[in-house]
Image (cartoon, grey):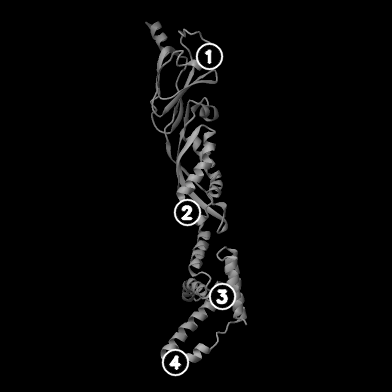
Amino acid sequence: MALMDFIKKQFIDIIQWTEEGDGTLAWRFPMRDMEIQNGGTLVVRESQMAIFVNEGQVADVFTPGTYKLTTQTLPVLTYLKNWDKLFESPFKSDVYFFSTRQQIDQKWGTPQPITIRDKDFGAVRLRAFGNYAFRVADPKLFHTEISGTRELYPVADLEGQLRGLVLQNISNAIAGSGLPFLDLAANQVMFADALTKELAPLFAKIGLLIENLTVQNVSLPEELQKILDQKIGMGMVGNDMGKFMQYQTAQAIPKFAEGAGQGGGIAGDAMGLGAGVALGQVLAQNLQQGLQGGGAAQAAPAAAAPTGVKPEDVMATLEKLGDLKAKGILTQEEFDAKKAELLKKLV
């Protein structure tokens, strides 16, 4: 009786994987010193594939289904072992199962801003993050390139490598999409499609298929976001010099009030912002409108009075405009137009 129990332990009749728990990509069937019974059953469930490995060589690959292990279902293994057609003896071979279902909600993101070329802003640094899903598509390739002879290969062991591939190809994806940053942030689906296209052949090299990559956010660092906000504000006023000066004054007024409340020098703040001249012009215009309301006789001298502009004020404003051009807020054409208009005031 003990001898019969020993013999039964040496042969395997059913080979299957119930895939308990999540996050496992590859699992080796526990063979120990046991052998597979001729005519035994292999069960490969949906969302699984299995391979037989004999003496280090991948022999046969099985898709979902139930198989009776004979010479008809193991042609490659039979060839490697050089068995006769009867194939009546038990045999030993390593059996690996692979999960082919989607591994969802894999996170990716830029831990530090990455620098890209942009049509509107030149070189900009941006952050992005999202998620993606992938699956094992070629178990033979995945076995030879990644999982090997390990008893268990979890998703966690592959996360860092895949995340690195995503980050490495973001710049190529943005260049391939042909979208400037402003359009890129508004067309995240197009960005995701371009990134997926870049990643697909890299995933395929290790037996994986990438699916459902999403871009959830694209943003600039805080200091560049402030410059973008100023650029948007300038876009609203166009090339009109008067509107530009009003815009600069509106931006400066909160700082003037803060400086006044803290006892700071308002004139110094105004010159630092390049808006001192603009503030004087706005106040003069308001005074002129008040005089016009009091009578035509008083309005005429006010209208005829020239607005005195000091050369040093003009130079300070030009320096500020130069800074805005250097930061990408003003284009060369906008700068030249405003420069010419300022210089006319010195004539």
| In this picture, residue 278 sits left or right of residue 319 | left
SS for callout 3: helix
* Residue ID for mark 4: 296
Please state which amino acid type lies under the numbered disc 4. Answer: Ala
Q: In terms of sequence position, does the residue under pointer 1 or pointer 3 come before the other?
A: 1
Q: Quadrant of residue 320?
A: bottom right
- Indicate the position of residue 75 as horizontal and vertical percent values: 49, 16
- The Cα atoms of the two marked residues, 4 and 3, are separated by 35 Å
* Residue ID for mark 2: 185
The residue furthest bottom is: 297
* Residue ID for mark 3: 271
Residue visible at 49% across and 91% down? 300
**Badge 4: few (under 14), some or many (20 or more) residues near its Cα, within 10 Å?**
few
Which sits in the foreground, 301 or 309? 301
**Quarter of the image where the N terminus is located:** top left
Q: In terms of sequence position, does the residue under pointer 3 or pointer 2 come before the other?
A: 2
For residue 325, above or below residue 200: below
**Quarter of the image where the C terminus is located:** bottom right
Marks 3 and 2: which is nearer the front? 2
SS for callout 1: helix
- Let me know if residue 316 appears in the view: no
Residue 79: which numbered mark, if any?
Answer: 1
